[in-house]
Amino acid sequence: MNSAGLIHRDIKPANLLRAADGSLKLCDFGLARILTNPSPRDTQLTHSGMFVGSPSYAAPEQICASPSIDGRCDLYALAATWYALLCGQPPFVSEDSADVMRRQLHEKFPDARKTRPDLPPDWMPILWKAGEKKAHDRYASAAEMRSAIERVQRQPAPSKIAPASAPPSPRPRESSAEASILALRSQLDLARSRSDSHNQITALRSLFGLYTQMDRREEALHAFREAIALHVRAHAPSN
């Protein structure tokens, strides 16, 4: 986003939409900050000393309402979003948003492999670097982060030779996906009981992705339709 002359400032799962070709589209630029020739409204948002964004995905400097944030705050939010899509919830979870923001300021992202043991070990260092608390310790740009991801993707998968007498290997990816679905369903039920449309949409989007990967088309379609309906209701103009 930085190369386009603006910072989104609210990257999160709820602001990602999947296109018909399978690509992801970033939406909701209501909090975006223009880096060149900012409008008076944008300047007010930046210098008011008030936090702008979503606590579960906001970078420390954004939480502190720093007037000098740059595109690296979006890289932090992207790392937190990636973590949420992998694990079914953001790195820091609490009913108290102030506690979430405190942990964003001081705590390292938990190791996602505790929830996703099938996750290749080379992915977490990328999430940790993009989620560094100091902006200068993160990737300098989205292009640099993408290069790191592509280097990991090019690495050959380690070969594993099982003993001849060993039983058939289990399918950890499938069992992990089922565990993630159960966790997301619990998260969805809790959000429904609280009429929390934001977290309902977040859980439904994650369920849609998992169902699609597992070729459970009917359940994926149901999750997609429910998420769209909630999104439309949440953004409908009030009378």
Image (cartoon, grey):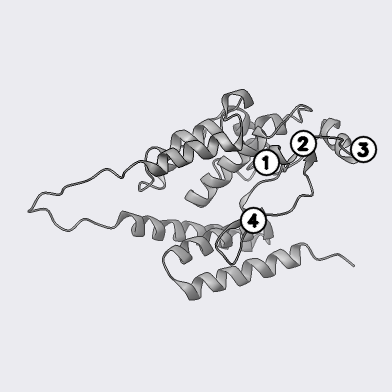
**Is residue 196 in view from this perspective?**
no
Q: Are marks 3 and 1 in contact (CB under 8 Å)?
A: no
Left or right, 180 with respect to 76, comes to left
Q: Locate the N terminus by quadrant.
A: top right
In the displayed image of the protein, which residue is found farthest to the left? 165
Residue at numbered disc 2: 51
Under mark 4, the amino acid is Lys
Question: Distance from label 3 to label 1 (Cα)?
Answer: 25 Å
Tell me the residue at 76%/38% (across/down).
Answer: 5
Earlier residue among tags 3 and 4: 4
Question: Which quadrant holds residue 236?
Answer: bottom right
Question: Distance from label 3 to label 2 (Cα)?
Answer: 17 Å
Residue at numbered disc 4: 25
Is 98 placed above or below 201 here? above
Question: Which quadrant holds residue 2?
Answer: top right
Under mark 1, the amino acid is Pro
Q: Nearer the viewer, mark 4 or mark 2?
A: 4
Q: Secondary structure at mark 2?
A: loop
Closer to us: 164 or 219 = 164
Q: Nearer the viewer, mark 1 or mark 4?
A: 4
**Marker disc for residue 55:** 1
Is 68 placed above or below 210 here? above
Under mark 3, the amino acid is Pro
Tell me the residue at 61%/52% (across/down).
Answer: 13
Q: Secondary structure at mark 3?
A: helix
Question: Distance from label 4 to label 2 (Cα)?
Answer: 25 Å
Left or right, 47 with respect to 53, comes to right
In the displayed image of the protein, which residue is found farthest to the bottom? 218
